[in-house]
Image: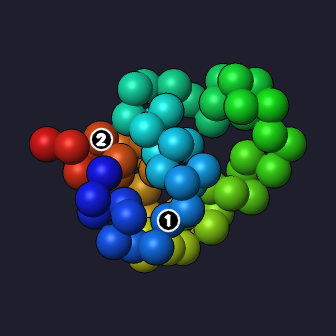
Amino acid sequence: MARLCECGLSDREVEICCLYALGLNGKTIQQYTRDGRHFQNVGLIRKKLGLGEHDRNIDGYIRSLLK
């Protein structure tokens, strides 16, 4: 989680990353958080983490940070 905070992610963005780390997919996270901007938020998260749009799945990247 410290790595995520170092990248300048907001608390909400860290929360979304944690849900990905638990194994939830984007659609499920969007329904859980009731956030219509979920996929826009993920785009901002990807940018802050230095991931390109097509580099890799954000869920896999988040899980790799935990290893």
Determine which of the numbered discs, if any, sits on residue 63 in the image: 2
Residue sitting farthest toward the right: 36
Q: Residues within 10 Å of mark 1 (few under 14, many from 20)?
A: some
Report if residue 26 is visible in the image.
yes
Q: Is residue 19 left or right of residue 31?
A: left
Amino acid residing under circle 2: Arg
Q: Residue at x 49, y 33 (%)?
A: 19
In depth, the one of 15 and 46 nearer the eye is 15
Q: Quadrant of the C terminus?
A: top left
Q: Compute the Cα span from label 1 to label 2.
A: 16 Å
Element on which disc 1 rests: loop
In depth, the one of 7 and 28 nearer the eye is 7
Element on which disc 2 rests: helix
In depth, the one of 56 and 8 nearer the eye is 8
Q: Residue at x 51, y 25 (%)?
A: 24
Residue sitting farthest toward the left: 67
Residue 31's place in the image compared with 37, above or below, is above
Q: Is residue 38 left or right of residue 15?
A: right
Determine which of the numbered discs, if any, sits on residue 9 in the image: 1
Report if residue 27 is visible in the image.
no
